[in-house]
Image (tube, rainbow, N blue to C red):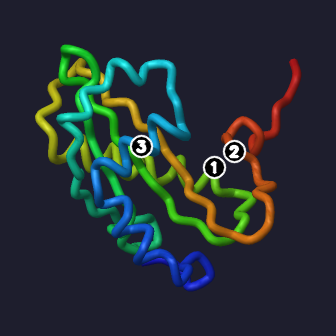
Amino acid sequence: MRNNKDSTPYDAGYKLLFSNPRIVQDLLEGFVKPDWIDEIDFQTLEPFKASFTTDDLRERHDDSIWRVKMGPDWLYLYLLIEFQSSDDYFMACRIMTYMGLLYQDIIRHEPLRRGRKLPPVLPIVLYSGSGVWSGPTNMGELVHRTHP
């Protein structure tokens, strides 16, 4: 479940909007624009149902998660869409945690054999706050680096 501070009156609308595969495709093609976009077979785009439990035993089952084939090898791409109304300085860490929970769910429920790689995950944060996002966008900006 989400903290109230993270919910917006638009969350239900966002969830409905991003339950449509064409909208998810348009998001990738129009806004994310990855270099490998031509490798995606959007005809295979389908929702992925997962339910996660965090360390503090809060269930997470309200994000939109999709999977799609990339190239000829049925590689999977999971889109994790986080709806966010406040500028969270530690969002990159939260997303990393959600990605870990998603990987644990994939390991438990998908036919992965020893030696097989996990699928790539593309996390997308949809920010609906009124101010400009100022928090770090990757973990490298949050971790202190020491020099030898």
Q: Position of residue 18 (x, y in %)?
A: 37, 59
Q: Position of residue 9 (x, y in %)?
A: 53, 84
Residues tagged 2 and 1 counted as in contact (Cβ below 8 A): yes
Foreground label between 2 and 3: 3
Lower position in the chain sequence, tag 1 or tag 3: 3
Q: Position of residue 137 (x, y in %)?
A: 69, 44
Foreground label between 2 and 1: 2
Q: Nearer the viewer, residue 106 or 85?
A: 85
Per the image, the residue denoted by label 2 is 137
| Type of the residue with mark 3 | Asp
Determine which quarter of the picture holds residue 6: bottom right
Q: CA distance from mark 2 to mark 1?
A: 6 Å
Q: Which label is found at residue 92? A: 1
What element does badge 1 sit on? helix
Residue located at (41% from left, 77% from top): 12
> Would residue 3 be found to the left or right of residue 26 on screen?
right
What element does badge 2 sit on? loop
Farthest right residue?
Answer: 147
Lower position in the chain sequence, tag 2 or tag 3: 3
| Type of the residue with mark 2 | Thr
Foreground label between 1 and 3: 3
Per the image, the residue denoted by label 3 is 26
What element does badge 3 sit on? helix
Q: Which image quarter is the N terminus in? A: bottom left
Residue located at (30% from left, 60% from top): 19
Residue located at (62% from left, 81% from top): 5
Lower position in the chain sequence, tag 2 or tag 1: 1
Residues tagged 2 and 3 counted as in contact (Cβ below 8 A): no
Q: Which image quarter is the C terminus in? A: top right
Q: CA distance from mark 2 to mark 3?
A: 22 Å
